[in-house]
């Protein structure tokens, strides 16, 4: 009789644990993703998600061009390498491509739309 009571109590505890876990467990969704914590992570996430964004430079990388919008179908510029404190942009050049790199300290702003 004592063993039967012990087994019933154990079964009740396990059942309660499973029920509470199912009740309070939330499925992971995109909203649960950790937002970017650094400029590098922000730029990489925008490029990866193919989001539209605009960068304004303190000193233009190309004379007269203080802002660049991405994606850029007209000039076919893309974001190349992104480091911890710099970003490079790639663009067509003769029969290949060339890169222009700038430190994050040259970025005045990075504008993008957040999706809900």
Image (spheres, rainbow, N blue to C red):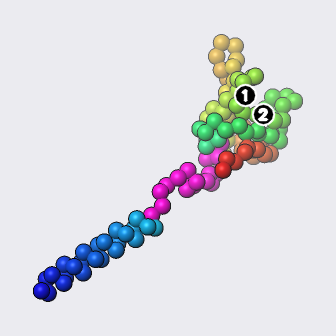
Magenta-colored stretch includes residue 32: yes
Residue 16: horizontal and vertical position, in percent? 34, 74
Q: Residue at x 83, y 41 (%)?
A: 58
Measured along the vertical axis of the image, is residue 26 above or below residue 5? above
Disc 2, SS: strand
Which label sits in the foreground, 1 or 2?
1
**Residue 88 numbered tag:** none
- Which residue is more in the foreground, 15 or 71? 15
**In the image: residue 59, left or right of residue 46:** right
Measured along the vertical axis of the image, is residue 47 above or below residue 116? above
Measured along the vertical axis of the image, is residue 91 above or below residue 6? above
Residue 57: horizontal and vertical position, in percent? 80, 39
Q: Mark 1–mark 2 contact, CB under 8 Å?
A: yes
**In the image: residue 39, left or right of residue 109:** left
Residue at label 1?
72
- Which quarter of the figure is the N terminus placed in? bottom left
**Pointer 2 local density, CA inside 10 Å: few below 14, some 14–19, many at least 20:** some
**Would residue 84 be visible to someone looking at this image?**
no
**Pointer 1 local density, CA inside 10 Å: few below 14, some 14–19, many at least 20:** some
**Would residue 37 be visible to someone looking at this image?**
yes
- Which residue is more in the foreground, 54 or 12? 12
Q: Residue at x 67, y 38 (%)?
A: 51
Measured along the vertical axis of the image, is residue 97 above or below residue 95? below
Magenta residue span? 25-43
**Residue 68 numbered tag:** 2
């Amino acid at each position: 009789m004592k063993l039967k009571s012990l087994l019933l109590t154990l079964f009740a505890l396990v059942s309660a644990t499973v029920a509470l876990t199912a009740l309070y467990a939330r499925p992971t969704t995109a909203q649960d993703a950790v937002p970017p914590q650094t400029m590098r992570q922000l730029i990489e996430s925008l490029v990866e998600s193919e989001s539209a964004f605009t960068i304004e430079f303190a000193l233009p990388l190309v004379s007269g061009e203080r802002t660049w919008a991405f994606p850029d179908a007209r000039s076919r510029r893309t974001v190349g390498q992104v480091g911890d404190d710099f970003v490079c942009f790639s663009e067509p050049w003769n029969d290949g491509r060339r890169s222009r790199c700038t430190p994050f300290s040259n970025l005045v702003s990075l504008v993008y739309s957040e999706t809900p």
